[in-house]
Amino acid sequence: MAPGYIFITFILYTALLFLISWLTTRKSVSNEGFFSANHRSPWVLVAYGMIGASLSGVTFISVPGDVVNSSFSYMMIVFGYLIGYYIIANVLMPVYYKLRLTSIYTYLGNRFGNTSYKTGSFFFLLSRVIGASFRMYLVINVLHLFVFSQWNIPFMVTGVFFMILILLYTFRGGIKTIVWTDTLQTTFMLVALVVTIVLITGEMNESFFSLSRKVFADDISKLIYTDFNDARFYLKQFLSGIFITIVMTGLDQDMMQKNLTCRNLKEAKKNMYWMSASLVPVNFLFLLLGGFLILFARSKGLLIPETTDDLFPIIALQYLGPAAGIVFVIGLISAAYSSADSALTSLTTAFCVDFLNFETRDDLEEKRAVKIRHMVHIGTAVTIMLVIIVFHAINDASVISKLFTVAGYTYGPLLGLFSFGLFTKYRVRDRLIPVVALLSPMICYVLSANSVLWFNGYSFGFELLILNGMITFAGLFLIRKGRLEK
């Protein structure tokens, strides 16, 4: 597919998002509207939009490509998601709604103290900056590879251009705009998935069911790995799915900020249940697409790229014709914008509320607060762009693998902090919280780096997140200082 056609598709889709942004922000949006959409979002709209936000560019590109390495074992993680979402709806969200939180990390301040509050928010900022950068890198890399590099434009320029567009359409509306644009982006992403599957089956002169049977008859559809030492061991995958969901949705300001825009807890729970149920068939289709891509490559004698994230874009843009290319680009852009815009907004919210104390300062007029928010928004975009450039220089593995590995280190302390707060009645020495939160991922890194040697060939997978949370929990127990007063 010619680079010019890809670029035009990209610009037209972006223009549509700008139109939605304008429609949702024709009147000036206050900080409350930016941070919480005034708690007026319909739950159906939030649930549908969150499907796209949960999937992101990682699922769109990296999950199908990773079938090459991990077959269908990712589905065990997805099954774990269901348990995780149930826990979020019935344990975490009632707390958030009861306290009427804008930033969910305010809970840690109420429970332990100000240092805990800042520590929790800091780890979210760190986690989300890295995670958002990984997701955006994946998309920017594809746009650069198939469009901008053809015009001899450097990767940095491609990244800056993409980031400026996201910055502009989220600048005023914040979460109020994103709730609506997520709906559009989820639709385009799912349409792209289905249409791509139809085009592949047509190109191979197979029906959907006959090609599916070939996938299921092949080792690429292997679901359960029974070797305990394997990072893909099914029980490790399932448990990891539970805790990945809890931390990357329930303890993540980005995802929970959308839930907290619902009118009440009952509607927020409906949102969570319907969204989680939808993710199972959608993720399965992405894995099935990965199987189709592998069979297509074999039938054409194509070499599987060393970086498996490139498998989907190469086939869609070079072997399936212009229609597939346009559909792929729209789906890819939808996935990218869906995760990038909400990440920018949630990071801005967390920094403004948690570190600049927007909700508790009496000396901050609305007009000045909006100006400060704009500056934070720009600063956040610059920070993410710098991380993307670094990641581009060192990238050497599937993005989905890297994303969950990093989550194991950065979200682990949040898992430990919230668990200790919710399930114990102990107070802690608040000033020592940062020490525990920093030591825990450091210990996990040492254990992970030496696990094969120290633990008889055992290799850590995504369950590193659970271990990290347990170490943090144990550390908090060691610095406890009595029980809460009744």
Image (cartoon, grey):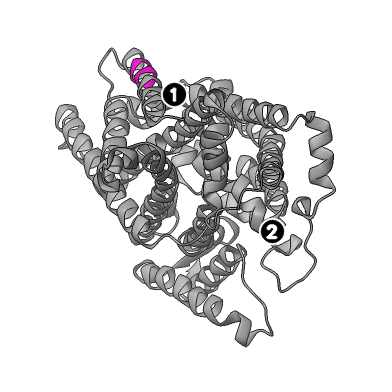
Q: Residues within 10 Å of mark 2 (few under 14, many from 20)?
A: many
Rounded to the nearest whole Å, what is the CA distance between mark 2 and mark 1?
32 Å
Q: Which mark is residue 237?
A: 2
In the foreground, 316 or 415: 316
| Vertical comparison of 118 with 313: above or below | below
Q: Along the horizontal axis of the image, is 315 left or right of 139?
A: right
- Residue 427 image offset from top left, x and y in percent: 47, 65
Q: Is residue 471 above or below residue 486?
A: below
The amino acid type, in three-letter code, at marker 1 is Thr
Q: Residue at x 62, y 48 (%)?
A: 302
Is the magenta region chiefly helix, strand or loop? helix
Q: Name the residue that disc number 1 marks.
A: 181
Q: Which residues are magenta?
A: 15-19
Give the amino acid at mark 2: Gln
Q: Secondary structure at mark 1?
A: helix
Whether residue 40 is in magenta: the answer is: no
Q: Nearer the viewer, residue 410 or 389?
A: 389
Q: Is residue 118 left or right of residue 307?
A: left
Choose the circle earlier in sequence order: 2 or 1: 1
Image quarter of residue 324: top right
Give residue 263's mark: none
